[in-house]
């Protein structure tokens, strides 16, 4: 009897134990969080402005792209070298003047950061027409009687260092140049002074709505069907010959004159241009002008040559009137596409000047 009771008690204890265990649930371990990798931060790329310089096709701050460019008359006599600030220009026009010399009209879409400019010399009617082709603000130091007549008749916005009013205050005589080069080669101005004068509201600062430059650009403007043209020599007159040597590293033509490199005295940089254009037209001495001043025909149409990337092609230029831009086309009539960058435009009389190419 005692053993039976022990068995009963043992069974009872086992049942109680099972009942107690049946009320418990085994906890499922929570999955461990997978480590989250921090995003990889790439170094910022070079800043590229959202706007486009209408004179070069290169990126620029949007705030400047609708501005009227500034066109500065540069003295190019050998005795006046080096010029100052010329290498910062977006487009340089070189045209014969009286006595076999040439002068430059240099266009700047923006003068921000541009310091001294000069030496500044007098203008002529055809340089004024070049400024009007870009709706530009003209900076000069005097002018021929015909130039002053046309400035008035054509209502040209200009800043004059010789016969100006308050605008003359943006010019000064550089004392070092006056001492070493003479009084006539010493007049200069600066980007800062020009911008300060324009900020006073003397002229319309931006192009009118609907205005557009007629220039077209591509990253590489090398003409596909062109002929080799790595070295160009252009004799303007007995006094002045210009040279353009293609530099494959920079993709630009390095400009020379007076038997040496064409150097900017502000920074020692040699003037260069991605695009070189030689435009042919009629240039002649004005009848009865004892000073030998000239006229260059800059409306109508004519032939020319385009150089880019070490190659050249013949082109055609046309211009409807003095207020219209130049339109450049290939011989088949398709628009000429320039390379992105600066342009150097030589205007010649083909009877007196022709480029030598090799």
Image (tube, rainbow, N blue to C red):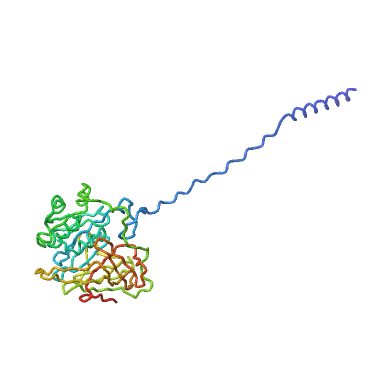
Residue 170 in percent (x, y) is at 16, 52
Left or right? Give the position of 50 relative to 142: right
Q: Is residue 110 above or below residue 27?
A: below
> At 10% from the left edge and 70% from the top edge, which residue is drawn?
288
Establish if 135 lies above or below 221: above
Res. 87 image quadrant: bottom left
Residue furthest right in the image: 1
Name the quadrant containing residue 12: top right
Give the residue at x 87% y 23%.
5
Q: Nearer the viewer, residue 129 or 57?
A: 129
Q: Is residue 124 above or below residue 171?
A: below
Q: 194 or 229, which is in the foreground?
A: 194
Q: x%, y% of residue 135?
A: 25, 57
**Callout count:** 0
* Above or below: residue 27 compared with residue 62: above
Where is residue 245 shown, x and y percent of the image? 28, 71
Q: Quarter of the image containing the C terminus?
A: bottom left
Left or right: residue 243 versus residue 49 is: left
Q: Position of residue 323 (x, y in %)?
A: 25, 60
Q: Quadrant of residue 241?
A: bottom left
Query: Which quarter shows the N terminus?
Result: top right
């Amino acid at each position: 009897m005692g053993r039976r009771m022990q068995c009963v008690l043992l069974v009872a204890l086992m049942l109680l134990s099972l009942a107690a265990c049946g009320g418990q649930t085994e906890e499922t371990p929570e999955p461990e969080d997978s480590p989250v990798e921090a995003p990889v931060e790439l170094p910022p790329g070079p800043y590229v402005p959202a706007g486009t310089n209408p004179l070069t096709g290169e990126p620029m701050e949007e705030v400047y792209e609708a501005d009227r460019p500034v066109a500065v008359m540069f003295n190019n006599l050998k005795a006046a070298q080096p010029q100052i600030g010329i290498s910062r220009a977006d487009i340089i026009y070189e045209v014969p003047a009286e006595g076999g010399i040439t002068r430059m009209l240099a266009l700047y879409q923006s003068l921000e950061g541009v310091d001294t400019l000069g030496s500044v010399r007098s203008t002529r009617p055809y340089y004024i027409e070049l400024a009007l082709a870009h709706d530009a603000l003209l900076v000069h130091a005097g002018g021929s009687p015909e130039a002053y007549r046309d400035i008035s008749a054509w209502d040209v916005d200009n800043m004059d260092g010789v016969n100006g009013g308050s605008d003359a205050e943006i010019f000064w005589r550089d004392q070092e140049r006056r001492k070493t080069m003479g009084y006539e080669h010493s007049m200069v101005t600066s980007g800062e002074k020009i911008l300060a004068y324009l900020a006073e509201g003397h002229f319309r600062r931006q192009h009118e709505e609907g205005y557009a430059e007629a220039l077209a650009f591509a990253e590489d403007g090398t003409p596909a069907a062109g002929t080799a043209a790595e070295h160009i020599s252009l004799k303007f007159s007995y006094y002045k010959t210009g040279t353009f040597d293609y530099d494959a590293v920079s993709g630009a033509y390095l400009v020379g004159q007076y038997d040496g490199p064409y150097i900017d005295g502000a920074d020692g940089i040699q003037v260069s241009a991605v695009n070189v254009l030689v435009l042919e037209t009629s240039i002649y001495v004005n009848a009865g002008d004892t000073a030998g001043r000239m006229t260059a025909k800059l409306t109508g149409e004519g032939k020319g040559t385009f150089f880019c990337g070490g190659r050249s092609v013949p082109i055609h230029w046309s211009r409807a009137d003095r207020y219209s831009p130049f339109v450049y086309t290939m011989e088949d009539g398709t628009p000429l596409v320039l390379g992105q960058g600066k342009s150097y435009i030589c205007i010649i009389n083909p009877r007196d000047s022709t480029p030598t190419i090799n």
